Image (cartoon, rainbow, N blue to C red):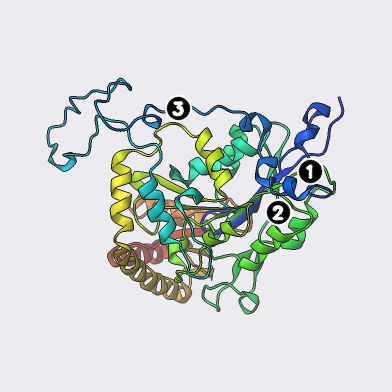
Amino acid sequence: MTKLPVELFATFGVGLGVGLLLHKYALAASSKDAITSTKGLSIEDQQDEVRRLVRPNILKLTPYRCARDDYSEGTLLDANENSLGPPLHDDHLLRDEGLERYPCPYQIDLKTAVANLRQRDSSPPLEDKHVFLGVGSDEVIDLMIRIACIPRVDSILITPPTYGMYRVCADIHDVNIIESPLVIVPPSSSTSSSENSLASFHINPAHVRRLFPHTSRVQSVSWAKCIPGNPTANSLRVADVETLLSSPDYNGFVVVDEAYIDFTGSSESSLAPLVTKYRRLVVTQTLSKGFGLAGIRLGIAFGDPELIQILSNVKAPYNINKLSSKVALDALANVDRLHANVRVILDEKQKVIDALQASPYVKAVYASDSNFVLFECANAYQVYRKMAENGVVIRYRGNQHLLNDCLRATIGSPEENHRMLTMFASVSAEVQQA
């Protein structure tokens, strides 16, 4: 059986990022109809570029129909619900929430609020049809791999150091992984919105392009690196993202992960409005970071309406519960509070950066457009362990590419930040003397 060339799925981290998903290594002639290039296709066929990148069995899938797909009002005795409601002791907080009923499967109000949040006057309008809601952005990552990558045939391309769930989801679905490591850009060369005096991490577009399959039969999916990245903290250059989208050698999805987008300091930073321009662009976000709602596990994907419908066909039914939806709508109606909280965090972050730069135990502090700081210090693992043993837990990142002896500290309250810095100084001194 003859093997046709594969596609690669590339991914670059969490936050606002860019990655590549090159998918569709096809096996035998039975698959080759699904592996076609835009070259030589009619205009009608080229307009079908989203469907061309999705696994054939997914396109044929008959989605599960929820009971509420058909009827949502009246005497509802069709979904085996308990009409008497939950046996809660203090139910006044949940009164009139209708928890005995399954939630709306469409979440139009919530999707509209999310679209309005990222709307720009200079771009075509974002609508609810451009928005997918998931159980955290991790569900979006998982679904993108499921719909686009054939197990043991396709590959994803990641740009380490990056968010670990890309590799985890690829491994779960038996999808190959190809790497294009980030490069450290000196302060004078950085175009990041972060502090100009600090080095930052960026993708190497030339290296990524060299990984594109050199065949007209390959369809690719690209997953963008976090902007800001995790654990790297800084934003990528938007021009690098658009280079991937416009490359004649790459005709797959580009997924931009914007989990930390609210900390970039600009309402114009998000690439979400560009999904109306680029059909193969997918932008993922979450309410876990800037909005401080990690407990409700609400993830977001902006994309072409056809792709959004495909994701909706594959997701589990009723994946967004009523309480999460209510809390999210309330938060999205109070964006001024979000901005106020972000300003406090950014002010605190600068204080932490200044303190770390002044520390004799810190070798380097990296640029940050997020709510955490990545820094390099002597004996990082020992410092991390002793700090944790003394009740202050930050994250050791020294086992990742380019991050030898690096620690990652989240920006907390002023009191938490002061305690972290004090503990870091005392523990570092103790470790150095040992």
Instruction: Choose mark 1 or mark 3, whichever is in front.
Output: 3
Label 2 neighbour load within 10 Å: few <14, some 14-19, many 20+: many
On residue 51, the disc is none
Distance Cα–Cα, label 1 vs label 2: 19 Å
* Callout 2 secondary element: loop
- Give the camera-side residue of 377 and 25: 25
- Marker disc for residue 180: 2
Q: Position of residue 409 (x, y in %)?
A: 43, 60
Which picture quadrant has residue 413?
A: bottom left
229 vs 81, left or right, is right
Q: Is residue 42 left or right of residue 187?
A: right
Front disc: 2 or 3: 3
Q: Is residue 424 above or below residue 143?
A: below
The residue tagged with tag 1: helix, strand or loop?
loop
Where residue 182 sits in the image (x, y, percent)? Answer: 66, 59
Dot 3, crowdedness within 10 Å: few (<14), some or many (≥20)? Answer: few
The residue beneath circle 1 is 218
